[in-house]
Every structure is written in structure tokens, then in C-alpha cells.
Amino acid sequence: MSRNSAAPSAQGAWEELVTTALLGTDRRTPPGAGPDREAPVALLDAAALETVRRRAGLRPAQAAPRPEPAPEDPRPVPPAAAVRRLAQLLADRAGAAGSGRRGTAPDLMELLPQWLATANTRGYAAPPHMLPALLDAARGRTDLRPAVLRFAGPRAVWLARLNPDWRFALRATPGGGTSLPRPEETEKIQGLWQEGLFAERVALLAAIRAREPAAARELLTSTWATERAEDRLMFLDSLRTGLSPADEPFLEQALADRSRNVRATAAELLSALPGSALAARMAVRAAACVAVDRTADTPTITVEAPHECDPSMERDGVVPKAPAGRGERSWWLGQLVEAAPLGTWPERLGGRTAAEIVALPVADDWQAELHAAWCRAAVRQRDAVWSRALLGTPSAPEAGGPGAVSLAERAKLLGTLDAAERADWVAGFIAAHGLSEAFQLLGVCAVPWAAPLGRAVVDALNIARDAGSYPWSFSGVMGLAERCLDPAEAHRLDGLLAVPDEPEDGAPGAGGYWAEAFQRLVTTLRLRASMIEELSAQVGDE
């Protein structure tokens, strides 16, 4: 028998059937079709027969190696009641879909971050049977990933290698879960630094920087000249941790880097060191632009912005090209003042304190530019004294101090204060100005909110309710209160659960909404209190 007349191979027969199905039986007669049979039926019969033949003739493949056992996690699992609560939180989906009103039921998924944070603080490990649900939740919400991966421990990486849906766990874990070398393993450290993947090298540098800043700097110096510009920028950013005068020589060399972004980052880091040579150079430049006019009836700050951006300024990180719509001279001035040590100004401006300097009038409409630059300097240098001066009193007109030109700047300035002072300032702000501009400021306050801040928020919500205010405009603050108010404050809200009388000029239906919102707030606070109690219980107590 000739080769052409040989029976088609199994693969060829299957491909013939697929081709016939694609072309259609009216254009190609399927195998086995006779004059007494319909062609489509014949095609299906042939496909069924060929499927059985393919399966029956399949040779068994070599068994794949069994996966390595999951790594041990020595941490204890949470108490049983807390585990049941976790399952409840993971099973919930936020609110009633498509409904404008949430009703009185708590949003359980929004409590999951707090549950995870508390469990991680107490050193618990995820129960093994909960790992898939936890990883699925973290897959859908990137904000959950750090807490979930910490709670899940090394088993999250083990599972991620088996399921591509959880690949984010490999990306988020340096080296895909490979442990970093110990400090004494110098050869392994050098090997990983020389040959590791970029993510592994970043993690290694950050870990060493956290425990031995000088060793991390020496490691970075050893390969600095051969690194790519984008890698140099990322590595340089790691020096923010433990930044000290010992880093100055390296950062001064980085000012001559061929990458503009690297030069700018090096200059920013040096300006955060008030005793650095760059800070001194910037102080000289900035002081030449700002002075006090003592000839006026009232001492007034005068400003003479730079007329050019010379090469030495560029080398020290001043960006010469101003953004669209911004004047060049004001752009250069802002960068000089931002980078100059704040200790420059009392001596330069007549021995005045920060508060006295900020209170001085500024000639020729330079106040906004000058004060905004001082705000950035206070944040960069973590100077609480200047932050207080620029914030002013929270009850000041227009809800800000003389230098705080935006809510974003106020929030950054508050970040330089300790948690208690920050909460007191925001509480005073809310008492004086209400909640309409407070949302961004509340976001920088420690959780749970301190008692004065919590009372200020509740009182402001109560005032808004009694005034018949449009209730949905406060939904963001109400949502924050559910997550951030101290659960111990729940009893203070019992008097707010009734539906209030609606004033004639109030928003229609507002009373019912406010009653629902306060009921949901109370229910959520009590649920959070139960969560904390469950996670605090001893395993044997149940």
C-alpha cells in the first residue's frame, strides 16, 4: 500500500474533522457520510468516535514531582472566635449593590484592614484553611496586600507558586520568598548584590540600611558607577532611612551624576541635612533674596528673586525650567528657600522666632510664594517649630495659619507633629470650622482617634444633623468615623439614634438618613470592640 493511501494518523484525523466543522458540511463531506445519512450527524458521530479513540490511546505521562511541603509557620493562629470573625469579614461584600442608602448594616470588608492590623500586631499567623480567601481578597484590593502577606507568612508565597492568580505575592516578596542573607553571611550578601534580580537587590539594600546604614552605603558605592540611571535613583532613595551627615560625601558626588533625577534626589537629601555643605550654599543664596525692610513704619519682609539660574545652582538641584504658567524667578526662589536650613532665618531676619517671622508682612505679593516654600522646608526638615508657626491656631480665619495656603500643605505640616498634638489641632479646626474641609486633615491623624478629636467629630456631625444639612455631603467623614473613632465612644452616640425633627429649610428625608448613619456608626463601633476583644482573648479562654 502506498504512503498516500495509508490511513490518516490520529492527529490528522482529528484535524480533518476540525477543518470540516469550520468550513461547514455543505462545503466538505465529513468522513463516514453516506447517501442515507445527514452530513452534520455524520460529523458529530465521527467526532465522538475520534474522541474515544484519542482518549483510549493516550499514553500515561510521567508523574510530575510532588511539590515541596509548605513551610512551617511557628506563630500561633488567632482564637477560634477571631477566626470565625475573619471568615465573616472575608465573606461580606460592601453594602447593597446599586443602592444609594447603605442602611444600618456595617460595611464588613472595610473593617478587614483593622482586623489584619490588630492580628499582625499580636503576632498571629493565618489559619491554613483561610489562606485562599485571604489571597483572593488581596488580589482584588491592593491596599490589603502588605497586611495580608504579613499575616499569611511564608505559606502565601508557597501557594502563589501553585496558582498564577496569586502571583502578586511573588512580586511583593523579595526574591519570590527567598530569605535574605543574614548580616554575617558576607559572601551571600555580595553574591546577591552582584547577581540578584533588581527587586532582590532593592530589598537587600533596604534591609542592610535599616540595621547598618554605613554598610548599605558602602555596598551601594561598590557598584554605583555601573548601575543604570533608573536603578541608581531607586537605590539612592533607600538612603532616606537613617540619613545622616555620614552620607554627605556620597551624596555630594551624586550631585554630578549624569541623570537629572538622580541629581535632584541627591540635592533633596542633602538639603534635609541642615549642616551639609549644600544646605550652607542654599542658605547663602536664599538669604541674599530675603531681607527685612526696617525703614518702613512696620518691619516688612522684602524679596528680590534670582535673575538667573546659574550652573552652580543647577548642580545643587535647582531645576531651571519652570512649569507652565509659573514665573521663572518665583520658581527659582521657591527652590532656594525650600532647600535652605530653617535655622537661617532667625539670624537673617533680626533675631525673630519662627512665629514672629511668619507674622511679618511680605512686600510686593511675595507672601504666598515665600510661605509655601517655608512649608515645604518644614516638612522636609521635620521641623515642628516652624510647622506650628505656619499652621497658626486652628481657629484662625479661613481655617489656617498665615503660611498654610492649602489643605494639602496643612496635612503635611501636621505630619511633623506628634500624634497627640496633631489630633488636638484638628479637633480645634473642626470645632471652629466644621467638617466641610476636615476630611483631608483627619486622614493624617492616628487611629483610633484621640478622645478630643473623636468628640469634635461627633459634635460636628450632630450640629450638621440638627441644622438639617444635606446628609450625603458628610458620608465620607461618617465612613472615616466608622473606621477611626475609638470604640469606647459608642455610648456617647446613643442619644443620636432617633429620627430628628426636620427643619423647614432642611434637606427632605435627611432625618431618616442621619438616624440610619448614626445607627450604622454605633453598630460598627461595637463590632470593632468585639473584634479587638476576640483577638485579645487567650486561646484557652474559649
Image (spheres, rainbow, N blue to C red):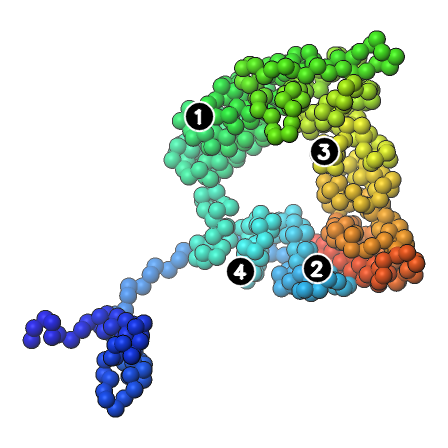
Question: Between tags 4 and 2, which lies in front?
Answer: 2
Mark 4 neighbour class, 10 Å CA radius: few under 14, some 14 to 19, many 20 or more: some
Q: Earlier in the sequence, mark 1 or mark 2?
A: 2
Residue 3 position within the rendered picture, expressed as x and y whole percent measured from the top left: 10, 71
Residue 315 position within the rendered picture, expressed as x and y whole percent measured from the top left: 54, 18
Residue placed under numbered mark 1 in the picture: 224
Q: Is residue 163 above or below residue 238?
A: below
The Cα–Cα distance between marks 1 and 2, rounded to whole angstroms, is 49 Å
Q: Earlier in the sequence, mark 3 or mark 2?
A: 2
Give whichever of 496, 29 is nearer the camera: 29
Residue placed under numbered mark 2 in the picture: 107
Give whichever of 507, 85 is nearer the camera: 507
Confirm or deny contact between disc 1 and disc 3 (CB under 8 A): no
Q: Is residue 337 above or below residue 518?
A: above
Residue placed under numbered mark 4 in the picture: 132
Question: Between tags 3 and 2, which lies in front?
Answer: 3
The Cα–Cα distance between marks 1 and 3, rounded to whole angstroms, is 35 Å
The three-letter code of the residue at mark 2 reads Asp
